[in-house]
Image: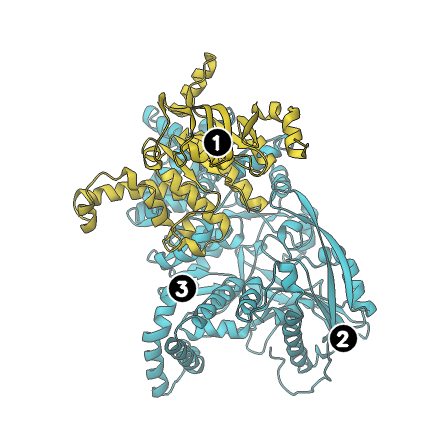
Chain colours: A cyan, B yellow
């Protein structure tokens, strides 16, 4: 016979056990918040346990059994997190799915994971599941959170979240064994159980289901919670996709381990505003979010009055000189400290407050390389921004930068208890406490990723820098060679281009060719704003992208990259000879980007084959017609004549210096 | 299922649908121009009724007649059982008729929240003196109204623009705010004048979903003018077709689509 106290006193090797522990140790402390009708609602740890308990018992009533898988589809809503905990409590495996996945992607994951249950956020998601219902043989029941629009649906196998909880409450009231049954189920859970299956976004081909065990998840999260001094006084905003390892790790797993409070935004679009209201103490954002914020700040500053603008730029300069040294506790002259203090009162403090960064102790960024200027900007304001390198297969952390030892071009030394080795081919290999068990129903892929000695192959090429920090240059399989043998690391070139605010995406080509070329995507925010200020009218994205002045501007950006590359002996030969600006934005709906917005290079190469040929056959423009997919899955066609520009190439500059970016 | 749709369903079952609004032999002219000639049709409780027709067919004039902005020279309009020939827009609003406009008519400088809040004005009962000081019962009343407005904001998924001045919003969102303001009146009959004009496909889909949800969740009866035939045929229960101020067809979407007069009117046959 199990009860809460016995579980909390035993081995805490599953998340439901941690939840029970939290409800006992810090039952009255906030565990979750969500903004509803404009007002923040809070649930304490003991309330969350109750919600999870009633939902789990209701699910059991519906016939949920140990070993069943349950899809969780939607945005960051408390009820979806409770679903994850409830499914884990019953010995099932939650399978979160990206909310913006199109029906086909959704069907693949649900079918592959043999889901018996699906919990969806709203009508949109329910419709998606129903549209592929005939392929989901194992699906027994579906549950939804938001009832709007669903009243008239057939409710024989469809249930509202509330109805399930009512059933659970009913069991608790009428059946005295229900409560014990719930705790028994939790107690039966073992550390070696599969805690969750996270489907990778699939940079190449079909996504794979990464199986993570409960004890490994908890071991990893415990290490990093200690590393970053997280406690139940912390607070986070869960705004990243629920199905992404980062959200599950940083918010759910670390939250359960450290007992801190997780706030869910009112809606996807209000996240920025909610961030400001919540004022989190721990924060993660991919580089593009930081970039977007900086662009917005700069645009708004240009609209500010002359005095404010002067003050802003003056103190940003001060911050550039002293800010990072102060943050890393290095010696700074007294004048610098005083000026910085004044700047903090006048500019940095208010700015951080507007951005919702006032209370942040630790912030991380990862996923893509971050521009050195961008990185320094936030750090100089006093934001403790660091980098980490991780993978779903590692349950996130492989490396992480320590406070005070932070650089923009590296990702830090191995995270606590992680071992890293660089293979002969330059690939990064690791063993970590959180490493995955294997890919679900795909032993072949597992064998291809984990070698006989237990090392996980990341597929990334990298090397350790002189101070022991890892530097990632590209995907190992993407690193190629030009015809003359020069090293060609496309991502390295692309990242340099993407550091310019005008460039949203870049795709470089050159492997097995005579020289490097690139496709560029303009950033509609930055270039659109620039066009507005310079009285350049345009009717569409396509027209703006093809504007001669936009071409001029991007040509100067590419030129700068070439000059930069000329200074790096290994890369000088890979300078960009020709480039073009794509007439449409690369989009995940068209399969050009992954759901985490990473470029799918081979797919793009195939789709825009004629354009690549044009880059190499010397022509100055090329007509292209491509198919586009609208959000509802319908298809359309878009055609354009794209111009191609030639670039100046600089002789390599020999320098006896480290290959700094 | 809510009370309104239940009664509608019950009424349908007995074969006598409850009529909310009845237009009988209405004619309207401006000087020598006849905008509407001898038109009769009805709107049943709980249905979505579309009014379609080529440009200049008299659709918007018809809506203006229904909500009392224009006064027809001939004919009778019966709303909820009470016949009337003349009625001012204010009275129509008080009786539960709300509308949106072909060209967005919002307070551009005010926030989304305030715009929708303004839709509650007719429902505010406390003296404006109390509201002036935001004190006592007036405050309680305002909190109650604000809750309703927040429900609408949630319903229309416009939380992110709650505080944004509507003049700065893209057109599709402005349309949504306007719908929000009309909903804030808790109308029994909602008149939508081209709710999807100028929208892209995605915005149209969203708007269609909202219109269906308003109808099913609040039981609101809806009369809408729309040019996108796909939308009209998908959304509406019954369609009335006007051409040159005259009614040329009335019936279910399928019936109307098969009607030769309608095909002629849209394809253009010499009159």
Residue found at x 50% / y 67%:
A295
Is residue A506 at least partly visible in the picture? no
Please name whichever residue, A596 or B205, is drawn nearer the observer in this view of the structure.
Answer: B205
Residue found at x 32% / y 37%:
B90
- What chain letter is assigned to the residue under label 2? A
Q: Where residue A368 sits: x, y (%)? A: 58, 64
Residue found at x 71% / y 79%:
A572
Between disc 2 and disc 1, whose residue precedes? 1
Q: CA distance from mark 2 to mark 1?
A: 59 Å
Q: Is disc 3 on the same chain as disc 2?
A: yes
B165 on left or right of A110 = left
Foreground disc of the pair 2, 3 = 3
Q: CA distance from mark 1 to mark 3?
A: 37 Å
Is residue A498 at least partly visible in the picture? yes
Callout 1: SS: loop
Q: Quarter of the image for the N terminus of chain A: give it.
A: top left
Would you identify the image quadrant in which residue A46 lies?
Answer: top left
Callout 3: SS: helix
Determine which residue is flagged by label 3: A355
Determine which residue is flagged by label 1: A150
Against A512, residue A253 (above or below) is above
Q: CA distance from mark 2 to mark 3?
A: 43 Å
- What chain letter is assigned to the residue under label 1? A
Q: Quarter of the image for the C terminus of chain A: give it.
A: bottom right
Q: Where residue A627 sits: x, y (%)? A: 71, 49
Check residue A275 in the rendering and tell me which mark sits there, or answer none: none
Against B74, residue A538 (above or below) is below
Q: Where residue A533 sits: x, y (%)? A: 52, 70
Determine which residue is flagged by label 2: A486
Callout 2: SS: loop
């Amino acid at each position: 016979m199990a009860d809460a106290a016995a579980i909390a006193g035993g081995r805490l090797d599953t998340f439901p056990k941690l939840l029970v522990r939290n409800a006992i140790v810090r039952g009255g402390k906030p565990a979750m918040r969500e903004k509803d009708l404009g007002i923040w609602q809070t649930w304490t740890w003991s309330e969350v346990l109750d919600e999870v308990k009633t939902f789990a018992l209701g699910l059991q009533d519906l016939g949920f059994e140990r070993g069943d898988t349950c899809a969780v589809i939607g945005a960051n809503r408390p009820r979806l997190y409770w679903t994850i905990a409830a499914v884990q409590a019953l010995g099932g495996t939650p399978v979160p799915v990206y909310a913006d996945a199109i029906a086909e992607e959704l069907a693949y994951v649900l079918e592959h994971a043999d889901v018996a249950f699906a919990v969806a956020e709203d009508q949109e998601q329910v419709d998606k599941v129903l549209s592929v219902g005939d392929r989901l043989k194992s699906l027994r029941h579906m549950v939804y959170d938001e009832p709007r629009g669903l009243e008239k649906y057939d409710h024989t196998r469809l249930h509202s979240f509330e109805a399930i909880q009512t059933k659970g409450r009913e069991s608790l009231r009428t059946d005295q064994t229900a409560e014990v049954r719930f705790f028994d189920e939790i107690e039966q859970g073992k550390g070696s159980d599969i805690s969750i299956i996270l489907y990778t976004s699939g940079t190449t081909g079909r996504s794979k289901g990464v199986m993570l065990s409960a004890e490994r998840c908890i071991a990893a999260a415990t290490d990093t919670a200690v590393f970053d001094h997280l406690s139940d006084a912390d607070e986070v905003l869960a705004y990243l996709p629920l199905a992404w390892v980062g959200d599950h790790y940083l918010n759910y797993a670390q939250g359960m381990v450290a007992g801190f409070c997780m706030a869910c935004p009112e809606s996807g679009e209000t996240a920025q505003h909610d961030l400001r209201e919540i004022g989190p103490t721990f924060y993660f954002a991919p580089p593009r979010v930081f970039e977007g914020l900086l662009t917005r700040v700069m645009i708004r500053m240009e609209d500010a009055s002359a005095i404010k603008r002067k003050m802003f730029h003056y103190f940003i300069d001060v911050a550039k000189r002293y800010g990072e040294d102060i943050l890393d506790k290095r010696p700074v002259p007294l004048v610098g400290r005083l000026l910085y203090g004044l700047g903090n009162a006048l500019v940095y403090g208010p700015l951080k407050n507007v951005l919702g960064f006032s209370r942040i102790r630790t912030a991380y960024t990862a996923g893509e390389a971050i521009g050195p200027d961008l990185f320094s900007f936030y750090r100089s304001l006093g934001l403790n921004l660091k980098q980490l390198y991780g993978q779903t297969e590692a349950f996130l952390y492989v490396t992480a930068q320590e406070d005070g030892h932070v650089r923009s071009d590296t990702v830090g030394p191995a995270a606590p208890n992680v071992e890293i080795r660089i293979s002969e081919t330059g690939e990064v290999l690791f063993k970590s406490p959180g490493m995955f068990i294997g890919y679900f129903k795909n032993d072949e892929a597992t064998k291809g990723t984990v070698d006989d000695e237990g090392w996980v192959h990341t597929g990334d090429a990298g090397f350790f820098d002189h101070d022991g920090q890892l530097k990632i240059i590209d995907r190992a399989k993407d690193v190629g060679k030009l015809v003359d043998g020069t090293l060609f690391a496309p991502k390295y070139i692309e990242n340099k281009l993407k550091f310019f605010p005008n460039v949203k995406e870049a795709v470089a080509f050159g492997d097995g060719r005579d020289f490097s070329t690139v496709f560029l995507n303009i950033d509609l925010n930055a270039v659109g704003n620039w066009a507005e200020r310079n009285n350049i009218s345009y009717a569409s994205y396509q027209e703006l992208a093809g504007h001669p002045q936009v071409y001029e501007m991007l040509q100067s950006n590419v030129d700068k990259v070439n000059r930069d590359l000329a200074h790096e002996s290994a890369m000088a030969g890979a300078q960009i000879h020709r480039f073009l600006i794509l007439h449409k934005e690369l989009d995940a709906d068209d399969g050009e980007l992954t759901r985490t917005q990473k470029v799918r290079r081979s797919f793009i190469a195939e789709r825009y084959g004629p354009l690549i040929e044009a880059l190499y056959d010397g022509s100055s423009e090329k007509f292209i017609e491509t198919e586009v997919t609208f959000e509802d899955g319908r298809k359309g066609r878009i055609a354009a004549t794209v111009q191609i520009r030639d670039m100046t190439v600089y002789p390599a500059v020999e320098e006896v210096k480290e290959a700094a970016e | 299922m809510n009370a309104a749709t239940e009664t509608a369903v019950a009424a349908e079952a007995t074969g006598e649908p409850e009529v909310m609004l009845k237009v009988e032999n209405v004619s309207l002219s401006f000087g020598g121009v006849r905008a509407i000639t001898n038109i009769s049709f009805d709107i049943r409780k709980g249905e979505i009724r579309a009014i379609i027709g080529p440009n200049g067919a008299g659709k918007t004039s018809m809506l203006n007649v229904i909500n009392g902005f224009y006064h027809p020279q001939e004919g009778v309009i019966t709303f909820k059982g009470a016949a009337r020939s003349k009625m001012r827009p204010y009275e129509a609003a008080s009786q539960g008729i709300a509308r949106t406009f072909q060209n967005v008519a919002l307070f551009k400088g005010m926030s989304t929240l305030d715009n929708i809040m303004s839709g509650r004005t007719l429902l505010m009962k406390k003296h404006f003196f109390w509201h002036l000081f935001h004190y006592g019962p007036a405050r309680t009343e305002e909190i109650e109204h604000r809750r309703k407005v927040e429900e609408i904001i949630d319903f229309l998924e416009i939380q992110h623009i709650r505080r944004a001045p509507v003049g700065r919003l893209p057109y599709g969102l402005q349309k949504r705010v306007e719908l929000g303001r009309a909903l804030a009146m808790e109308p029994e009959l909602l008149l939508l004048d081209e709710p999807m004009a100028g929208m892209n496909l995605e915005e149209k889909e969203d708007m269609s979903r909202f219109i269906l949800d308003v109808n099913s969740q609040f039981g609101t009866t809806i009369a809408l003018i729309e040019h996108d035939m796909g939308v009209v045929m998908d959304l509406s229960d019954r369609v009335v077709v006007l051409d040159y101020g005259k009614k040329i067809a009335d019936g279910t979407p399928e019936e109307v689509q098969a009607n030769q007069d309608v095909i002629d009117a849209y394809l253009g046959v010499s009159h």
